[in-house]
Amino acid sequence: MLQNQLVMREADFKKIQAVIERLTRDANAKGIYIVDKAGQLIGEAGELRGIDSTSLASLTAGCIAATGGLAKIVGEEEFPIHFHQGQRDNLHITLVGQRMILVVVFDERSSLGLVRLRVKKAGAELA
């Protein structure tokens, strides 16, 4: 299924960038990424700039698509929140609206509770 490409005005991009930069500070995150469901990177903030964000964006979109299929199998429409815990870093992935995905990378300097709290507020602003 083809989706229309996301088109954004510069003013909207600046608002999104301001929200994710604030979220990076408030959640004490290593990095924040906004991705569209087609796998295109929209914005990024934090100390992880420079990683392979193209791969991160496409793999995140693939993860959302795969778990969307799992959700339908068990009778859910979607799983809007995903959490992946690693030895060093953790990922918190949230669907924002119908087209965007918010990815938060954090480590022991933060906590899942703090990230979830801050993401809830930022997600409402982004939507």
Image (cartoon, helix red, strand yellow):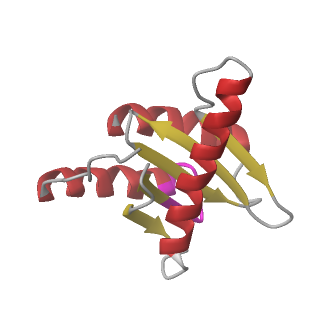
Q: Quadrant of residue 64?
A: top right
Residue 100 appears in the rendering: yes
Q: Quadrant of residue 114?
A: top right
Q: Eyeballing the image, is 45 above or below 121?
A: below
Q: Going 64% across and 20% down the picture, which residue do you hit?
A: 76
Q: Going 48% across and 73% down the picture, which residue do you hit?
A: 54
Residue 52's spot in the image, x, y percent? Answer: 54, 79
Q: Quadrant of the N terminus?
A: top left
Residue 63's spot in the image, x, y percent? Answer: 63, 51
Q: Going 34% across and 40% down the picture, which residue do you hit?
A: 126
What is the tally of numbered marks visible in this picture? 0
Q: Quadrant of the C terminus?
A: top left
Q: Is residue 81 left or right of residue 88?
A: left
**122 or 28: which is nearer to us?**
122
View extreme (right): residue: 87
Q: Is residue 116 left or right of residue 38?
A: right
The magenta stretch is: 24-32
Q: Eyeballing the image, is 92 above or below 49?
A: above
Residue 113's spot in the image, x, y percent? Answer: 70, 37
Residue 49's spot in the image, x, y percent? Answer: 48, 77
**51 or 65: which is nearer to us?**
65
View extreme (front): residue: 1
Asked if residue 66 is among those painted magenta in the image, a careful observer would answer no
**87 or 40: which is nearer to us?**
40
Residue 47 appears in the rendering: no
Q: Eyeballing the image, is 71 above or below 64?
A: above
View extreme (bottom): residue: 50
